[in-house]
Image: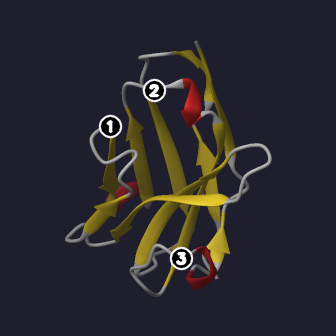
Amino acid sequence: QVRLVESGGGLVQTGDSLRLSCAASGRAYAVGWFRQAPGKGREFLAVITWDGVSAIYANPVKDRFDLSIDNAKNTVFLEMNDLKPEDTADYYCAAGPTFSRTPSEFNAWGQGTQVTVSS
């Protein structure tokens, strides 16, 4: 099973950018990003196939977030721009055998990285 480690979270101000990294121990068909704010459920953000051919984004972030892959480092990046206080959450990457928005279809998860956006 693929092991995932996220990094890159932190405290930023409204309008700032952050790049989250998801380092994988191996390859999977797809890697997704999700977030969970306090008291809320896990929210789908984006998913990309490891070959980079297909990617989809959730409506709240599609004009601000961008996925990329460094194949040499087995790492998937989530570039987040124009951050807002409502983006404050724990961010998780996940790997799985299907190109999906559904958390249950991913079988490997990282430990999460916290992002806090101050107003």
Front residue (pair 41, 79): 41
Amino acid type at mark 3? Thr
Residue in the picture at 35% in, 53% down: 59
Establish if 74 lies above or below 19: below
Q: Mark 2 points at which residue?
A: 83
Q: Mark 3: give few (<14), some (14-19) or many (20+) Cα within 10 Å.
A: few
Q: Name the residue under label 1.
A: 64
Task: Identify the element where label 3 is drawn.
Answer: loop
Whole-percent x, y for residue 5 in the image: 64, 55
Amino acid type at mark 2? Leu
Whole-percent x, y for residue 44 in the image: 51, 61
Q: Please indicate whether residue 80 sits to the left or right of residue 62 in the image.
A: right
Q: Please indicate whether residue 114 sits to the left or right of residue 14 in the image.
A: right
Q: In which quarter of the image is residue 89?
A: top right
Residue in the picture at 53% in, 73% down: 95
Residue 102 is tagged as 3
Spatial CA span between label 3 and label 1: 21 Å
